[in-house]
Image (tube, rainbow, N blue to C red):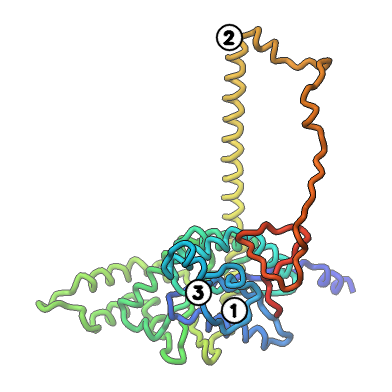
């Protein structure tokens, strides 16, 4: 009985946040729908908490709990700020990020009832990975929940060595930028198996052989082209990068490989707790210490300036002393202000533009869609 009591009182693990990132057309939204369907089909069902961060998408194949389109009107952003498609997506994401603390609050309320939080990012990969808003969202989620980056790759379009190398370089840059557990997800394996990619990652000589036999490897004089030589060199550089990288092949159409993906996610949770979390705490402590050092230095310089001023002007320093018997003329400072909040109470289902309105404690929100 004591063991069962201990099991009941044991704290539940935090849900794992999965950030789906990938090139346009790699199948991110379809992949999110597939893992959503997989989790619903478990016994018992384990529905995830899904966030859609793409403001320009017209249709998503899943029901998002929080949808950026409910908060920011992408078309209106383009009109009001005179922006193009990519600028509109970036600005919409920036506006949404200003209220991301509310999003985290909603996610944390559901942390006890869900096992996975899934973020579907915009199709234009650079808008999320290289923008300030993308970094803020990633860091905010990673500081609250165990977080995994799932880099989705279009396997049929990666059979060419040059395209494969471009994907690997981008994956490497994202890994070292986020410093989070990283999973390479070779999607669309029902069209093209990903075995060739695994072979290229495990043995750079196999990749170099494929590169040599690929068209355009040599110029008209029979010499290796510049691109050929560059990719040969990059395959040697990335060989160490491949050693500690997890790669899985999945088919968002058939569901093949989804179980292996979640096995990799659970392994990445341990990596987050052992490597990322201690590093996060160390960096946070170092940041707080640096801030405290700046405050102490400012206070020391202020006290030195006061000592010098008192030494030069002793009479002025005496006049600055406070007389407890002197009447305080600033009686207005103690006056209590009776502020009245005339904000109308929000009715159920009312649209709330959180980019303009400040949320009150008693005000509802319409972000989470009914599941």
Assess disc 2: are there few (<14), some (14-19) or many (≥20) residues with their C-alpha within 10 Å of its C-alpha.
few
Q: CA distance from mark 2 to mark 1?
A: 73 Å
Of residues 305 and 52, the one drawn nearer to the viewer in this rendering: 52
Q: Is residue 289 left or right of residue 241?
A: right
Residue 248 percent location from the top left of the image: 50, 80
Q: Of the residues under marks 2 and 1, which one precedes in the sequence?
A: 1
Mark 2 vs mark 1, foreground winner is 2
Give me the residue at 34% from left, 66% from top. 237
Mark 2 vs mark 3, foreground winner is 3
Residue 18 percent location from the top left of the image: 58, 72
Give me the residue at 57% from left, 84% from top. 61
Which numbered tag is attached to residue 56? 3
Mark 1 vs mark 3, foreground winner is 3
Q: Which secondary structure lies at badge 3?
A: loop
Work out which quarter of the rendered image holds the N terminus and state it.
bottom right
Q: Which secondary structure lies at badge 1?
A: helix
Assess disc 3: are there few (<14), some (14-19) or many (≥20) residues with their C-alpha within 10 Å of its C-alpha.
some
Q: Provide the residue designation for mark 1.
A: 263
Assess disc 1: are there few (<14), some (14-19) or many (≥20) residues with their C-alpha within 10 Å of its C-alpha.
few
Of residues 31 and 259, the one drawn nearer to the viewer in this rendering: 31
Give me the residue at 23% from left, 80% from top. 212
Residue 56 percent location from the top left of the image: 50, 74
Q: Provide the residue designation for mark 2.
A: 312
Q: Which secondary structure lies at badge 2?
A: helix
Quarter occupied by residue 286: top right
């Amino acid at each position: 009985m004591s063991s069962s009591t201990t099991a009941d009182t044991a704290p539940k693990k935090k849900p794992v946040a999965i950030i789906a990132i990938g090139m346009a057309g790699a199948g991110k939204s379809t992949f999110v729908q597939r893992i959503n369907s997989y989790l619903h089909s478990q016994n018992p069902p384990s529905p995830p908490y899904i966030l859609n961060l793409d403001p320009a998408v017209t249709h998503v194949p899943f029901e998002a709990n929080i949808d950026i389109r409910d908060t920011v009107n992408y078309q209106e952003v383009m009109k009001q700020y005179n922006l193009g498609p990519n600028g509109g997506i970036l600005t919409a994401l920036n506006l949404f990020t200003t209220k991301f603390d509310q999003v985290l609050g909603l996610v944390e309320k559901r942390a006890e009832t869900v096992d996975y939080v899934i973020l579907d990012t915009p199709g234009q990969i650079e808008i999320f990975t290289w923008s300030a808003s993308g970094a803020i969202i990633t860091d905010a989620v990673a500081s609250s929940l165990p977080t995994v980056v799932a880099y989705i790759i279009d396997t049929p379009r990666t059979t060419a060595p040059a395209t494969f190398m471009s994907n690997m370089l981008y994956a490497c840059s994202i890994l070292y930028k986020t410093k989070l557990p990283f999973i390479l997800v070779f999607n669309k394996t029902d069209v093209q198996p990903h075995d060739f990619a695994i072979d290229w990652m495990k043995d750079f000589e196999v990749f170099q052989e494929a590169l040599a036999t690929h068209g355009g490897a040599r110029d008209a004089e029979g010499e290796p082209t510049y691109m050929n030589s560059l990719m040969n060199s990059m395959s040697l550089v990335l060989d160490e990068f491949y050693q500690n990288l997890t790669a899985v092949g999945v088919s968002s159409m058939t569901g093949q490989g989804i179980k292996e993906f979640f096995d990799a996610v659970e392994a990445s949770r341990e990596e987050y707790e052992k490597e990322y979390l201690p590093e996060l705490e160390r960096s946070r402590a170092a940041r707080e210490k640096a801030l405290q050092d700046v405050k102490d230095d400012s206070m020391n310089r202020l006290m030195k300036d006061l000592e010098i001023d008192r030494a030069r002007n002793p009479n002025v320093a005496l006049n600055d002393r406070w007389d407890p018997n002197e009447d305080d003329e600033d009686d207005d400072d103690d006056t209590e202000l009776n502020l009245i909040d005339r904000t109308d109470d929000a009715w159920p289902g009312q649209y709330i533009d959180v980019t303009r309105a400040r949320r009150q404690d008693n005000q509802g929100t319409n972000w989470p869609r009914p599941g």
